[in-house]
Amino acid sequence: MNLLWILLQEHAEETPNLFSLSTSVSFWTVIIFLLLMAVLSKWAFPPILGYAAAREKRIQDSLDEAKRNREEAERLLATQRQELAQAKAQAQEVIAEGRVAAEKVRAELLERARVDQEAVVARAKEEILLERDRAVEQVRREAVELAIAAAGRLLEERLGSEQDKKLVIDYLSRAKPVTSKTAGVA
């Protein structure tokens, strides 16, 4: 080192010129550079290059993993889209089946209501006819009773004459076939 110091002292008095090539400075520069390169290549470059290679490998592995993950995500996304489309199609099918079933139930309910309505109307008509027949029969009975009562009164009042007796006998002889005919209908 003393040698270096002496050399530096000698040259320190001179004004340095960067562009001038002196043999002693150039020689020592080359020697120092070669020594530095030897030291660096022996102890510094292998760890630096090893670290760089390891980092490059990690980066490459990360890129490969990211690529695989992206491809897997795209595959899963495509599968999910396909399943979603199938689910939508199934949902539309279920909705369509539901509409068909609802229409069928609606038609059945309308038909059942129509049949029930017709049955109610038929029963009502039958009841009306029965009530009419009962009413007609009631009116007939009352008319007969009134006619009999009126005839009884007439007979009580007029039974004295011969002509009245003949008239009643004639009427009763004609009334019997009509009464039996009426009794058969009722």
Image: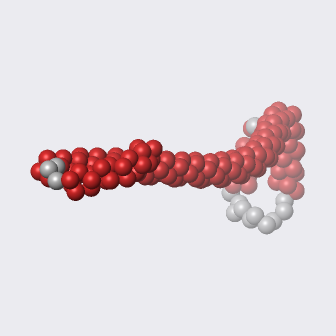
Visible residue check, residue 38: yes
Give the total of numbered labels. 0
Colour scheme of the picture? secondary structure
Q: Quadrant of the N terminus?
A: top right
**Image position of 169 with respect to 54: above or below:** below
Q: In this view, does 152 lie to the left or right of 77?
A: left
Residue depicted at 87% across the width and 50% down the height: 30
Q: Quadrant of the C terminus?
A: top left
Q: Nearer the viewer, residue 162 or 57?
A: 162
Q: Position of residue 86 (x, y in %)?
A: 73, 48
**In the displayed image of the protein, which residue is found farthest to the left?**
157
Q: In this view, does 26 lie to the left or right of 127?
A: right
Q: In this view, does 53 lie to the left or right of 97?
A: right
Q: Where is residue 92 in the image (x, y as percent from the top left)?
A: 66, 52
Residue depicted at 74% across the width and 65% down the height: 17
Q: Which of 4 and 152 is in front in this view?
A: 152
**In the displayed image of the protein, which residue is found farthest to the front?**
162
Q: Which of 156 and 29 is in front in this view?
A: 156
Q: Position of residue 4 (x, y in %)?
A: 76, 43
Q: Which of 110 and 8 is in front in this view?
A: 110
Residue depicted at 30% across the width and 50% down the height: 169
Q: Where is residue 77 in the image (x, y as percent from the top left)?
A: 73, 48
Residue depicted at 86% across the width and 38% down the height: 41
Visible residue check, residue 4: no
